[in-house]
Image (spheres, grey):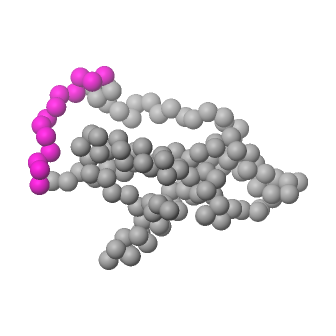
């Protein structure tokens, strides 16, 4: 069962990494250099802090949160994406393996530890899909 969970976590991690790369690829193609800010996706009462608390979650009920860490080395990644699709570049279509991409652009072990420490300090139980070396 634990092996199945690790495989599911591995698939999820790979999907997140490639989804992030695809997003940055689309942004690079459009020539946008800044992140887009979403507007109107949070109700005003929530964003202003005026939303009334409705109570605590019952102890028997679990609430699952997913925290996704951003990719590192954004400028380097944007440059790589440009070279991967430039026929004049020596890097043209020389794609990175999952391991190479993760090592260069994925969150570090320290990044994961910081999130785990934050979760624990705030009373959350932490379970990660990422394996540490």
Q: Position of residue 126 (x, y in %)?
A: 31, 53
Name the image quarter holding residue 117: top left
User: Is residue 90 depicted above or below 54 in this figure?
Assistant: below
Residue 106 in the image: state x and y as whole percent.
56, 52
Residue at coordinates 27% horizontally, 24% vertically from top-left?
49
In this view, 34 is above or below 12: above
Vertical arrangement, residue 5 with respect to residue 31, above or below: below
Q: Residue at x 49, y 52 (%)?
A: 109
Vertical order, 113 against 33 (above or below): below
Residue under the image location 31 percent in, 30 percent down: 43
Could one spot residue 12 in this view of the protein? no
* Residue that appears at 65% across and 61% down: 100
Out of 42 and 122, give the one closest to the viewer: 122
Magenta stretch, residue numbers: 48-60
Residue 62 or residue 111, whichever sits in front: 111
Quarter where residue 53 is shown:
top left
Is residue 18 inside the magenta stretch? no
32 vs 15, left or right, is: right
């Amino acid at each position: 069962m634990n092996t199945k969970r690790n495989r599911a976590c591995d698939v999820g991690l790979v999907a997140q990494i490639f989804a992030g790369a695809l997003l940055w690829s689309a942004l690079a193609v459009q020539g946008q250099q800044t992140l887009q800010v979403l507007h109107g996706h949070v109700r005003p009462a929530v964003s202003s802090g005026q939303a009334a608390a409705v109570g605590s979650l019952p102890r028997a009920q679990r609430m699952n949160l997913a925290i996704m860490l951003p990719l590192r080395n954004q400028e380097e990644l944007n440059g790589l994406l440009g070279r991967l699709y430039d026929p004049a570049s020596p890097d043209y279509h020389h794609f990175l393996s999952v391991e190479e991409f993760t090592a260069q652009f994925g969150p570090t072990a320290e990044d994961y530890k910081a999130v785990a420490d934050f979760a624990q300090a705030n009373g959350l139980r932490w379970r990660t899909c990422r394996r540490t070396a």
